[in-house]
Image: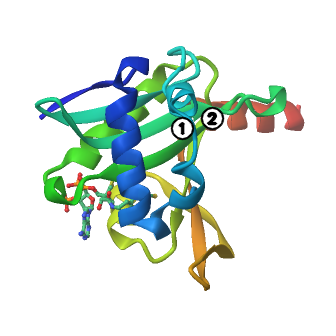
Amino acid sequence: MTYRKLNRGDVVEFQRLRLFGLRESPAAFGSSFEESSVLSRQSFESMLDFSDADGAVQGAFDGGRLVGVGGLKRETRLKEKHKGIIWGLYVDPEFRNRGVAREIMQRLVEQARAMTDLVFVKLTVLASNEPAKRLYEKLDFIKFGCEPKALLIEGKLFDEDYMLLALEPEKSAGELAAAAGAARS
Ligand SMILES: CC(C)(COP(=O)(O)OP(=O)(O)OC[C@H]1O[C@@H](n2cnc3c(N)ncnc32)[C@H](O)[C@@H]1OP(=O)(O)O)[C@@H](O)C(=O)NCCC(=O)NCCS
């Protein structure tokens, strides 16, 4: 298995795996196969087009075949640029339970830590998606909320959990302590 950041040149494999995943695990994603399958090749290319300062899509390859993928992107609005979003984590069923998703997530978190002024990364996960939630918890993500009935898929409603990983807990704790000290003085 090889791991690397995807670029526009990987668009054919990325589009194939993304559409396969949306069809195979529809409840795992906010995006739908129906809407994504009619998107242009350029739309998929644009999902891979990031500067390192704003995120990345990481992929796992078995030879030339993309078998795992996950993305990180910085929020774009001025008041939200301190937040990163993890999106689209998916591993081909044939390659599950071998640590592929863990490696992809570790790479995304490593990159998030290297991104200037990023304070935390967050993600949404189906409340009933125990495999994914266990993975995120092992990587120190914590749940901070739940949106009831967040997704409507084939007539069924699903709750989603919100999770986040603080990127600089020591610094945040220090800043809080300093702020508390300033308030006392
Ligand atoms: C969730 C998913 C990405 C996990 O991928 P994977 O490569 O099989 O995961 P890994 O082998 O890296 O497992 C890492 C950890 O995840 C958890 N995990 C993975 N699969 C699990 C399962 N079937 N049951 C329980 N925990 C599981 C475990 O904590 C595991 O650590 P461990 O091996 O030390 O027990 C994969 O099942 C998938 O693509 N599912 C469909 C799409 C999806 O749900 N994406 C997440 C959207 S939020």
Give the x, y percent position of residue 127. 51, 74
Q: Identify the amino acid type marked 1.
A: Pro
Looking at the figure, which quarter contains the C terminus? top right
Marks 2/1 in contact by CB < 8 Å: the verdict is: yes
* Ligand 1, image quadrant it occupies: bottom left
- The residue to which callout 2 is attached is 172
Which residue does the image show at 11% across and 35% down from the upper left? 1
Q: Is residue 78 left or right of residue 101?
A: right
Which residue does the image show at 64% across and 21% down from the upper left? 117
Quadrant location of residue 119? Answer: top right
Q: Which mark is residue 104?
A: none
Give the x, y percent position of residue 147. 68, 71
Which residue does the image show at 24% across and 36% down from the upper left? 60
Q: Nearer the viewer, residue 160 or 94?
A: 94
Give the x, y percent position of residue 126. 51, 69
Which residue does the image show at 51% across and 45% down from the upper left? 87
- The residue to which callout 1 is attached is 169
> What secondary structure is marked by label 1?
helix
Q: Identify the amino acid type marked 2.
A: Ser
Q: Nearer the viewer, residue 72 or 143?
A: 72
* 100 lies above or below 53: below
How far is disc 2 from disc 1 in space, using C-alphas? 5 Å
Disc tally is 2
* 5 lies above or below 80: above
